Amino acid sequence: MSGDGLKFREGAEFELLPNLAFVERMLREMQRYLKELGFPEEDWPQLQLAVAECLNNAIIHGCSDQPDAIIRFRWAWTGEGLTVQVRDPGEFTPPEDWNELPEDPLAESGRGGYLISQYFEHIRHENNERGHEITLTKKISHQPLPPNIAAVEDELQMMTQDLSDSYESLAAMFNISALLATSKTFDEFLRNVLGRLRNLLSNDLVYARIQQTSGEWTIYFDRQEESISPPLAVLSAIEEKVWEDRKFISHDRARELPSDDPLQQWEAGLMLGPISFQGTPIGLLVTGRRRGQAFTAGQTNLLRTIADFVGVAYTTAELYRQREEQMRELRELEIAAQIQQSLLPTTFPAHEQWEIDGVCESARAVGGDFFDAIVSPTGHILVLIADVMGKGVPAAMLSSLLRASARARLDLAHDPARLLTELNRLLAGDLAALDMFITVQIVSLSPEGDSMQVANAGHSELLGFTVPAATAHEIASDGDIPLGVMPDTPYRNTKVQVTTGQVICLLTDGLYEVEDSSGEMLGFEKLATLLPTWWTGDLTTFPSACLAHLKLLQRDQQSDDRTLVAIRRKPLSS
């Protein structure tokens, strides 16, 4: 069944849906057919009335409440006479007076049998498993003329060409399937497909445009001769129309295109249509010839099929590329995460006066937070915390570079400001090239255990408290410019006296930028009030306990790294 509800089967035979709008069309087809065979014109009006009644009855009565039913209508005129047959899915047994004129000749119903029997000599009704079938026959005084041999030959030639195109299309799709399996890349596949298509259609040029995410077009083409110019980088007017309408065009009058249209040269035939996948536009497929016959319906269908195939191949290649890229990124992140974890201390310096412990929790496989704790040759304990702008592999690599650079200058552990200044000088060039920066805070604990020197490069301030305490207090330090912003920045030390039992917290902004269930940010001051309440009595468990409490407060999934390093001056009882 075709899209309009009719299907031409063979000879003078149609199948139609039960729609009265088709009756007039069927009568026109029948009249055209009989006229070509010399049917007497004086017989046509009465024949038309009779056949119309048969079709109307089949639609109205035979297909009642069956909108999807099929009616078969066929006729033949031979030397033995004219035969008309209508079959519907219903059932009908004519009453005895079916062929008589009703009492009211102008009534809309009841006269069908009369009109039919007035023209046809023999009428047969048959009810079987297929429905009701009425067969009408009449002897015609004229003999049908012999068929138009030229018309028949043209019809046979078109049928032969379509059949040939179908076989060629099938063979072409097998070849293209093989190309898809053997081509290493989509580019290689498409170039091979265009070459096969041009040879198959005997065309001068075949090309495809694939639109990139940037909006630019990548052009692939195959041409018969080098003298044929490749496609222009911009779309022609007709290409723009196909791209906008998403419809195929088979144009056998390309010469009528505007004179400045580069596709005008394909005057013998021009086909172009969209390449897409599930409604998503991908590109255009275009082919043209200067000489020869216009494109057949089979060739047009072949181009449509190949365009669809290219759309599937492109989408498959893109999905495979994306998956490979994701797998590669995941692998890189896994490696970088292993590197980053290996940089974090697993043990902390033991000292008679100081206790140190810390934890780093990344929001992604690889984050930008980092900390370290080392004992220098002079006995000073160097504690460093940093937050690299960004995440992923670059952040992990910069953390590694920072750690290595700091450990290389342990001779400056007693003077964190000089160490920061030296680190900034060493790393500024690399950070500028990457358009990144690092906030860093360095604490140098005195060997005597009573004070510390603090130097800051744009990092969060320290918080300190002594148990019991209602809140932690901020320990201010001088320095608000991160590493990598200004290479010649001089950093300064801040000396802080530390009392017995006092806890000092180095932290990153991920701790106080947590959003609670109401969407409100925790904030630095609120964190200061909470830290003493989370004290566990044991420094080795305190940092992990703080991060666990933050998880209970947060509304959504963790979006930033969280690092907390705790330093405690041991109580006298220790």
Image: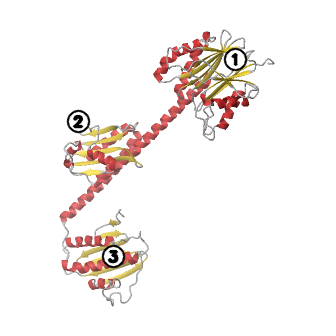
Quarter residue 203 falls in: top left
Residue 75 place in picture, x, y as percent: 29, 74
Q: Nearer the viewer, mark 1 or mark 2?
A: 1
Q: Can residue 75 be seen here?
A: yes
Please give the residue where the numbered disc 3 appears in the rendered image: 55
Residue 474 place in picture, x, y as percent: 66, 23
Front residue (pair 345, 332): 345
- Left or right side of 40 for 433: right
Pointer 3 local density, CA inside 10 Å: few below 14, some 14–19, many at least 20? many
Inspect the image, locate mark 2, and give the three-letter code of the amino acid beneath it: Glu
Cα separation between marks 2 and 3: 61 Å
Circle number at residue 2: none
Please give the residue where the numbered disc 2 appears in the rendered image: 226
Inspect the image, locate mark 3, and give the three-letter code of the amino acid beneath it: Leu
Q: In this view, does 225 lie above or below 528?
A: below
Inspect the image, locate mark 1, and give the three-letter code of the amino acid beneath it: Pro
Q: Earlier in the sequence, mark 2 or mark 3?
A: 3
Image quadrant for the N terminus? bottom left
Q: In this view, does 545 lie above or below 93?
A: above
Q: Which of marks 1 and 2 is nearer the N terminus?
A: 2
Q: Can residue 40 be seen here?
A: no
Residue 70 place in picture, x, y as percent: 39, 70
Please give the residue where the numbered disc 1 appears in the rendered image: 349
Pointer 1 local density, CA inside 10 Å: few below 14, some 14–19, many at least 20? some
